[in-house]
Amino acid sequence: MQVIIRSDEETACDLAASIIDGRVRGHLDSVLGLATGCTMETLYDNLARRHERDGLDFSLIRTYNLDEYIGIPPDHPGSYRHYMNEHLFNKVNIDLRNTHLPLGMAEDLAKECEMYEKSINVNGGIDLQLLGIGESGHIGFNEPLSALKSRTRDKALTPTTIEQNKHLFDPPESMPKRAITMGVGTILEAKRILLLVTGSKKAEILAKAVEGPVTSMVSASALQLHERCTVIVDEAAAANLSCKEYYNWIFETEPEWEEYR
């Protein structure tokens, strides 16, 4: 795991966008794992600008999102399909047939989860998985006590997660209480992982995930087990990290990051 600290949300998202940009340009048929959330909106705006301004080509890219709420249709304004269409897919030249999210309205949820895993594998696995972190420490909707080898499944949401996201629904009480999510084990099979975290509200949980013990109570801590995980944060989110000087020194001296400095 490598931690890179940028001054603010904009510069953190710009670095994350540059990494994704490099992957897409270097491998036009890449499989990207995508996430949602407020920070991702800034990132996706950045990628859309790169498409318009610099010709970043998504025409052969295939995507798999981490999760989707159960019980709402894809065109519901609170669904993650709607989110992705609004914030990225409709702004770039991606083929919507190559964009995948779990179907929250599936009659057989277990079968839907099984088919989602199979689809990822048929397409060669995820080359670059983008992640955020929830205030409960989740990646995807892998809430506390999620098994570190878990696969895509139906998961109950914690009160913390519901409180964090209910403002996106009208009325807030209509927010679903369950979701389909990639498992921790599914996420860890990605060839590369990019965790993007901004804001002071995430400082405490980020420190637990990066510098604390690996535990099912903080599913993001499992990223410590991945051989190629890059964590990009702004100063606000990095406030509780104890080794900030070391992380900055690594970024400034590693040849791998020379083009991004």
Image: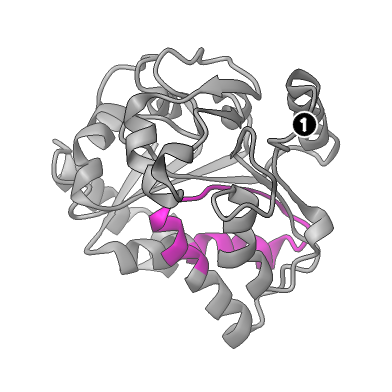
Q: Is residue 21 visible?
A: no
Q: Secondary structure at mark 1?
A: loop
Q: The C terminus appears in which quarter of the rendering? A: bottom left
Q: Residue at x 64, y 20 (%)?
A: 151
Mark 1: which amino acid? Ala
Residue 9 located left or right of residue 242: right
Q: Residue at x 80, y 32 (%)?
A: 121
Q: Residue at x 51, y 15 (%)?
A: 148
| On screen, residue 111 above or below 247 | above
Q: Which residue is mark 1?
A: 106
Residue 172: name its quadrant: top left
Q: Residue at x 37, y 37 (%)?
A: 134
Q: Percent from the top left, x then y, of residue 257?
A: 41, 59
Residue 46 located left or right of residue 55: left
| On screen, residue 152 above or below 246 | above
Queried whether the magenta region covers residue 110, the answer comes back as no
Boundaries of the magenta span? 17-44
